[in-house]
Amino acid sequence: MVLRATIAGCGAYLPERRLSNDELAALHGLDTSDAWIRERTGIGFRHMAAPGETASDMGAAAARDALAHAGVEASEVDAILVATSTPDSAFPATAVRIQARIGASRGFAFDMAAACTGFVYALGVADSLIRAGQARCVLVIGTEVYSRILDWTDRGTCVLFGDGAGAVLLRAEEGTGAIADRGIISCHLHADGRFGDILHIEGGAGSTGGPGLLRMAGKEVFRHAVTKLAAVVDEALAANGLTHADIRWLVPHQANARIIEAMGRKLNLPAERVVMTVERHANTSAASIPLALAEARRDGRIADGDLVVMEAIGGGLTWGAALARF
Ligand code: UT7
C-alpha cells in the first residue's frame, strides 16, 4: 500500500467586477482593440479585484469553496500551501492569513513563489508531503491580484492578466501504486534562472525595492512556452508509461489561447478535451489552473477516473506538469 494525494474538492473565486477588452481600453486610454486582443490571445474579459480586496480575501473564498465541495471541515486541514506572486505582504504569509480566515488552526501554512507555474509547484510539494506522511489534508491555493502589479500604460502586458483564486483540497488515501489509483500520479518541475529577465517584476516588495511592475518580452516567452510545455508533458507521460492517447483532459495554464491550442495539437487532443477559460478570465497566473479545474470538475466534464494533465510556464523561467486521476 502507498499513500496517494487525491483531489477531494475544487473551489473558485472571481471578483465581482468584470471588464471587457473595450471597457479596459477606454478606462486606461489604451491604443488597442477588442479584435487585436482576441486574435492574439483569445482573451475577451477579465475580473478585477475591488479596492482593498487582497490575495488572502480571494484565496480564503476559494478555499472555503473547495472545503464545501469536498465536504471537509476547516478544522481537518493540516497544511495550507499558497501559490502567489501578489501576497498581501512579505509576512505573515498569505497562507497563514487564509488559515485564520477559514477557521483552521492546526498544522502549518506557507507561500510559494513560482509565478504562473506556482500552482503546479505547490501541487508537487503538497503531493510529496502527503506521500511522506507529513500531512493528510492539504489545501493548495493559487490566488493573484495582478491588477496591482500591471503597468497600465503598457498595452503589451496590461491587457493579458486578470484577478482570481482557485483551490483544491487534497486528502491522503491508501492506493496500490497502480496507474489506475485516484490522486496525483506525478509532478515534474523545472526552472532556468538564466531566462529571468524575459518575464519579471521590476523592483517590488523584495530587497531591490522599486515600483514593482510586471515586464515581459512576450514573443520570447511564447517561444519558450510552446517547446518547454510540450517537453514537460511528454516527460510526465513517459515517466508513467503513458501516451497522448491516455489523456482525458488537458487543464493548461491559461496565458494565451494560441499556446493552449498549439499544445492540444501536439498532444493530439480535440478542443473538447482541453479546458479553456482564458476568454473569460484572462491570465490569472497561479490561479488559472485551479480555476479551470474547479469549473470543469463541477460542471461534470472531469469525471471520476479521468486522467488529467496540468501544465504551466511562468516567470523564472519556471515550468512544470502534473498528472492526476480524479
Ligand atoms: O503567463 C506566463 C506566460 N506568459 C505567456 O505565455 C505570454 C506569451 N506571449 C504572448 O502571449 C504573446 O507574445 C503576446 C500576446 C504577449 C503578444 O502577441 P504577439 O503576437 O507576440 O505580438 P507582438 O508582441 O509581437 O506584437 C505585435 C504588434 C507590435 O506592433 P509592431 O511592432 O508590429 O508595430 C506591438 O506593438 O502588436 C503590437 N501590440 C499591440 N497592438 C494592439 C502589442 N500589444 C498590443 C495591444 N493592442 N494590446
Image (tube, rainbow, N blue to C red):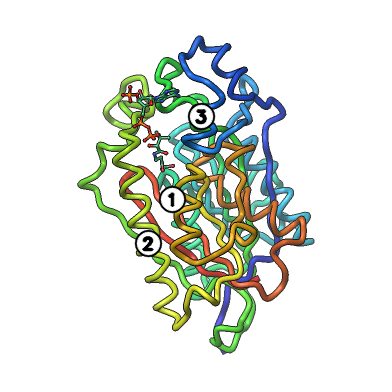
Which x, y percent locates residue 83?
49, 47
In depth, the one of 213 and 265 nearer the eye is: 265
Which of the two labelled residues, at mark 3 and mark 2, occupies the earlier sequence position? 3
Mark 3 and mark 2 in contact? Answer it, CB < 8 Å.
no
Task: Tell me the residue that label 2 is attached to.
Answer: 189
Which of the two labelled residues, at mark 2 and mark 1, occupies the earlier sequence position? 1
Q: Is mark 3 within 8 Å of ligand 1?
A: yes
Which labelled disc corresponds to residue 37? 3
Q: Amino acid at mark 3?
A: Ile
Which x, y percent locates residue 3?
56, 80
Q: CA distance from mark 3 to mark 2?
A: 30 Å
Q: Residues within 10 Å of mark 2 (few under 14, many from 20)?
A: some
Q: Residues within 10 Å of mark 3 (few under 14, many from 20)?
A: some
Name the quadrant of the C terminus: bottom right
156 over 258 or under it: above or below: above
Task: Give the secondary structure at mark 1.
Answer: helix
Q: Amino acid at mark 1?
A: Thr
